């Protein structure tokens, strides 16, 4: 991660196909487009990659989460359980629908703690959204069982874990719906873009219409399409899809690089007695987008991050004080700073945040260090980097 590090001729060729015919719109213009249907082709390609029947491309990962939830009928006043550690997009996408994000603790997988999920279920709960953070995954067996037993939707936000698998299944394909982002820093990038994947045909049809103004996409005359229900515009453009098409074909190559480097970091840094690796559920294989590890406590994590900075090791973070990815600094959510009025139902639904105690999450996020794995590094650079990281950890903690 990220895929832009390896942009090349493939991406240029795909984009030129689109520029040559001038059709930037993914629907219609059949005669002008000279056979180029980049978004449709990318959907077919992603359907193979994720071993899932239906794929709907959308304009971003955030849009993917909103569209996924909407396509399954989640809306005003419904509660969606999500983790304290994710990207702000998770609650944004839920609140866009007038639904209520219910934040619960994570565990040593850095994803949803199944026990915390169980405790958070109320009669208003409609969905559990597991966010597959930093290239790995939550305890999918337990989460699936909870969803089944309580008749809840299981949605996977796999934006940061493209290519990871659980029991041989691609992450994103395990829940009822899966969401991906292809924004500028993700493993596959196309500038801005995302995808919803599902094996449920009616969710797919809903997502297809909903993300394009509710147009039914029937018949060949686009102007004559009717609207079975209300929708919005969450479309992707042909230009973006073209870049994505070039990138997705390179995913196996990207994953091989990421996993090779992850192994080096795990062997070198993971060998230190002060270091514990992040827990990956049995049957899970990480995408290798990040290398994650735990130190004994928050203080040592802070010292190590400082040491990394001074030693020139970039792209490593401790998320405890990070305001993009962790609940502690999400004051705009806690104080409900909205540009426009928010419904009383959502306000009431979010009152729990005033006194919420996420000690369990603090415990794991406080001790965690997460390092981006770059595709552009050479193997020698990775080995050198890993050795340097291990030296810094040893010296600052002793
Ligand atoms: C990047 C990301 C998103 C949002 O994707 P965008 O395409 O940037 O809207 C959502 N969830 C997670 C976990 C992400 O990392």
Image: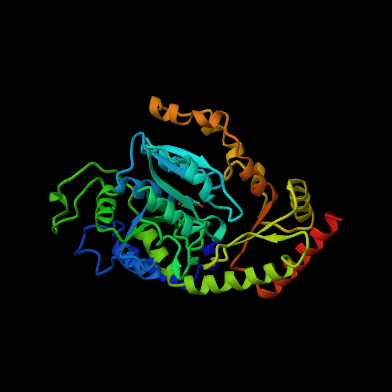
Q: Is residue 356 left or right of residue 273?
A: left
* Residue 59, visible in the rendered structure: no
Which quadrant would residue 343 be assigned to in this image?
top left
Colour mode of the rendering:
rainbow
Q: Residue at x 46, y 29 (%)?
A: 338
Which quadrant of the figure contains the C terminus? Answer: bottom right
Q: Foreground residue, 384 or 394?
A: 394
Q: Residue at x 19, y 64 (%)?
A: 31
Viewer-nearest residue: 238 or 356? 356
Where is residue 137 drawn, in percent x and y?
A: 52, 59
Residue 225 drawn at (x, y percent): 15, 50
Side (left or right) of 320 relative to 388: left
Does residue 386 appear anywhere in the picture? yes
Q: Pinpoint residue 365: horizontal percent, then vertical percent.
A: 64, 48
In which image quadrant can residue 281 be found?
Answer: bottom right
| Nearer to me, 108 or 162 | 108
State the image coordinates of residue 220 (x, y, percent, origin top left).
14, 59
Looking at the image, residue 389 sits to the left or right of residue 375; the answer is right
Vertical side of 254 occupied by 175: above or below? above
């Amino acid at each position: 991660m990220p895929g832009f590090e390896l942009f090349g001729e493939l991406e240029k060729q795909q984009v030129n196909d689109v520029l040559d015919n001038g059709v930037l719109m993914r629907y219609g213009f059949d005669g002008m487009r000279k056979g180029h249907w980049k978004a449709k082709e990318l959907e077919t390609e992603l359907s193979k990659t994720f071993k899932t029947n239906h794929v709907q491309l959308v304009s971003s990962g955030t849009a993917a989460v909103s569209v996924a939830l909407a396509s399954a009928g989640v809306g005003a006043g419904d509660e969606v359980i999500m983790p304290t550690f994710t990207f702000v997009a998770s609650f944004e996408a839920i609140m866009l629908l007038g639904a209520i994000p219910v934040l619960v603790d994570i565990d040593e997988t850095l994803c949803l703690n199944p026990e915390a999920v169980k405790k958070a279920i109320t009669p208003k709960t409609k969905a559990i959204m597991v966010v597959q953070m930093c290239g790995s995954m939550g305890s999918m067996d337990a989460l699936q069982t909870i969803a089944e037993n309580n008749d809840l939707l299981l949605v996977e936000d796999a934006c940061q874990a493209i290519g990871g698998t659980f029991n041989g299944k691609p992450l994103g394909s395990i829940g009822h719906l899966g969401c991906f982002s292809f924004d500028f820093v993700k493993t596959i990038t196309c500038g801005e873009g995302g995808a919803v994947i599902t094996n449920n045909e009616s969710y797919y049809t809903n997502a297809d219409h909903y993300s394009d103004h509710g147009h039914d996409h029937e018949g060949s005359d686009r102007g004559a399409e009717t609207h079975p229900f209300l929708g919005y515009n969450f479309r992707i453009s042909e230009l973006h899809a073209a870049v994505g098409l070039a990138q997705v074909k390179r995913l196996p190559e990207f994953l091989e690089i990421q996993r090779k480097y992850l192994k080096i970091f795990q062997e070198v840094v993971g060998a230190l007695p002060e270091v514990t690796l992040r827990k990956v559920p049995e049957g899970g294989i990480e995408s290798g987008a990040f290398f994650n590890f735990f130190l004994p406590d928050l203080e040592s994590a802070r010292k190590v991050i400082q040491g990394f900075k001074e030693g020139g090791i970039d792209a490593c973070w401790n998320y405890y004080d990070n305001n993009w990815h962790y609940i502690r600094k999400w004051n705009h959510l806690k104080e409900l700073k909205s540009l426009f009025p928010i419904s009383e139902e959502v306000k009431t639904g979010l009152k729990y945040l005033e006194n919420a105690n996420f000690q369990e999450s603090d415990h794991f996020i406080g001790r965690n260090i997460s390092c981006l794995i770059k595709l552009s590094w050479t193997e020698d650079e990775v080995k050198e980097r890993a050795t340097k990281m291990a030296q810094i950890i040893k010296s600052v903690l002793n």
